[in-house]
Image (cartoon, rainbow, N blue to C red):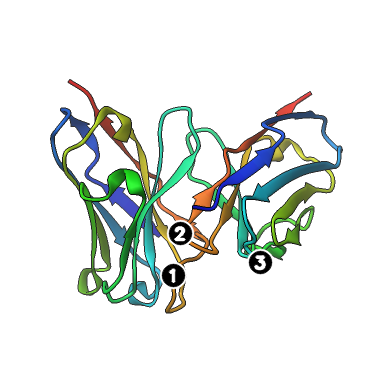
Amino acid sequence: DIQMTQSPSTLSASVGDRVTITCRASQSISSWLAWYQQKPGKAPKLLIYRASSLGSGVPSRFSGSGSGTEFTLTISSLQPDDFAIYYCQQYNSYPRFGQGTKVEIK
Amino acid sequence: QLVESGGGLVQPGGSLRLSCAASGFTFSNYWMSWVRQAPGKGLEWVANIKQDGSEKYYVDSVKGRFTISRDNAKNSLYLQMNSLRAEDTAVYYCARDSEFVSCCGFFDYWGQGTLVTVSS
């Protein structure tokens, strides 16, 4: 099984900050990686697929990069609506999620 | 749109059948998945099924206990859950999976989730 590890687990930031979350795969997954945002009591929302493609309707301040085993999600200028939990997911094989990164207000 | 139903409280060892009604897209063109989230925990993919139902895959922890199925004529996805355990307690989400022939993909549409509680 491919294991997905996100870092950090929690991130404290302020509105306007540039934020980067890292996701590492235990073996190469090419670019078969997606990122999701989840707010309390809500279903996850797709942000990024194929490592760097923006999901439908997702603001351009979100971007993804990486390939192989190391990937990043970047929020260029954190907005109040962005405080949430973020998950990466590999789909090179049976889907597997990272443990999540909580972005909280500093 | 994806709308789940069928969740509730069930005793350990019991059974439950979840349903997911799909609308707004051609259901038969997509793999479909169930993803769950235990209270206060992260996301866990549970199972998926190919467009025509000919391939099904499960996470190890539910193999032999859960069965995924679909009815393309009714635009519906199902999850039959038997021999339920306390650790199966979670919100279960139905999600649209890959449109390709081969497994697997990302999840671009999700239902609102249905809560399954396994407790005596």
Q: Position of residue A69 (x, y in %)?
A: 69, 56
Element marked by disc 1: loop
> Do callouts 1 and 2 mark residues in contact (Cβ within 8 Å)?
yes
Q: CA distance from mark 2 to mark 3?
A: 14 Å
Cα distance between the residues tagged 3 and 1: 15 Å
Q: Foreground mark, 3 or 1?
A: 3
Chain containing the residue with disc 3: A
Q: Nearer the viewer, residue B1 or B105?
A: B105
- The spot of residue A24 in percent (x, y) is 68, 48
Q: Vertical placement of A60 versus B51: above or below?
A: above
Q: Name the foreground residue: A94 vs A53.
A: A94
Of pointers 2 and 3, the one earlier in the residue sequence: 3
Q: Residues within 10 Å of mark 1 (few under 14, many from 20)?
A: many
Marked residue chain, label 2: A
Residue at numbered disc 2: A94
Query: Which residue lies at the image location 40% right of the left edge and 69% below the top edge?
Result: B24
Look at the picture and state if B19 lies above or below A22.
below
Query: Can marks 3 and 1 be said to lie on one chain?
Result: no
Q: CA distance from mark 1 to mark 2?
A: 8 Å
In the displayed structure, does residue B29 sit left or right of residue A43? left
Determine which residue is flagged by label 1. B103
Residue at (57%, 57%) from the top-left corner? A90
Protein chain holding label 1:
B
Give the residue type at disc 1. Answer: Cys
Q: Are marks 3 and 1 in contact (CB under 8 Å)?
A: no
